[in-house]
Structure formats: structure tokens, C-alpha cells
Amino acid sequence: MSKKILFIEDESALQRAASTVLTEKGYTVLSALDGELGIAAAKKEMPDLILLDLILPKKDGFEVLKDLKADPATQTIPVIILSNLAESADVERALTLGARTYLVKTNYRLEEVVEKIDGILQ
């Protein structure tokens, strides 16, 4: 059975591109376009990994991460932050809240993001 990845990202073009690449690699990809939908999807679907943007409508990525890590049902799901926020304070905050890895969108190609995902899910 393929591993499930939940991508919480409000940019639909990036959602589609990542979804295509990850599906080709054999992953099942679920999408959420805002923080509230992302939390609901995580609790309902119990993905193997969550890719999370920080700048989201309704509930930002920091709040989503905090909620996921506070809930015993979702706290063990690895979360990779994929954001344009590159300030060290943002990186530190996300890692302190429980993110496994922090990737700045402009510094990584989708193939490299997939490599990170593969590494965590092996």
C-alpha cells in the first residue's frame, strides 16, 4: 500500500506540481488549501507525512503544527515545513514546535523535496 502524504499549501499551482511528482513516485497525495482543512484532513486521513506551508489562510502553519503536535492522534506524524519564510527565527520556531525538517521553497527543487520525503519515510 502506498504511503499517504498530506500537502497543506494554499498555492494551487504548487499543490498540483508536487502532487504530480509525488504520485509518479508512488505516493498517495492528499491536499488541503488552508490550515483548518489541513488539521481536519490530518485527523481524518492519518497521513504518513505532512508537507506544511507556513503562510496559510484561516490558520497559519505554526498554529497547524502546534495543534498537530498537541493531539496524541497526530503528534507522531512527521512534518516537513516547505515555506518561503527564510528567517532563522521562523526556522527555529518551526523546529521547536516539532517539525522534522525546514525547507525554503526557493532553495529546493521538487525532486529534492521528494528525496527528503523518501529519507524520512524509509
Image (spheres, helix red, strand yellow):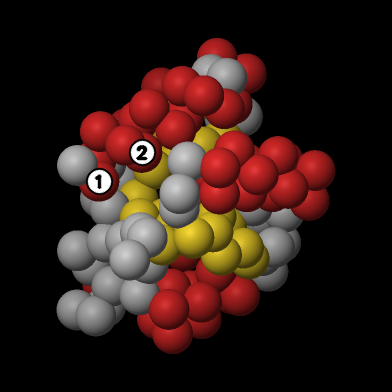
Horizontally, residue 12 falls left or right of residue 28, namely: right
Horizontally, residue 115 falls left or right of residue 21, namely: left
- Disc 1 crowd, CA 10 A, few/some/many (<14, 14-19, 20+): few
Q: CA distance from mark 1 to mark 2?
A: 6 Å
Q: Which residue is mark 2?
A: 117
Q: Which of the image's four quarters has the C terminus?
A: top left
Determine the secondary structure under disc 1: helix
In x, y percent, where is residue 115?
38, 27
Determine the secondary structure under disc 2: helix
* Amino acid type of the residue tagged 2 in the rendering: Ile
- Disc 2 crowd, CA 10 A, few/some/many (<14, 14-19, 20+): many
Compared to 10, does 44 lie above or below? below
Farthest residue toward the bottom?
Answer: 44
User: Does any portion of residue 106 appear in the rendered image?
Assistant: yes
Q: Are marks 1 and 2 in contact (CB under 8 Å)?
A: yes
* Amino acid type of the residue tagged 1 in the rendering: Leu
Q: Camera-side residue: 87 or 117?
A: 117
Q: Name the residue at 35% across, 75% down.
A: 46
Quarter of the image holding residue 2? bottom left
Q: Name the residue at 36% across, 38% down.
A: 117
Quarter of the image holding residue 85? top right
In x, y percent, where is residue 21?
59, 38
Farthest residue toward the right?
Answer: 13
Q: Name the residue at 31% across, 46% down.
A: 99
Q: Which mark is residue 121?
A: 1
Q: Which mark is residue 106?
A: none
Farthest residue toward the top?
Answer: 107
Q: Name the residue at 46% across, 22% down.
A: 112
Q: Camera-side residue: 67 or 101?
A: 101
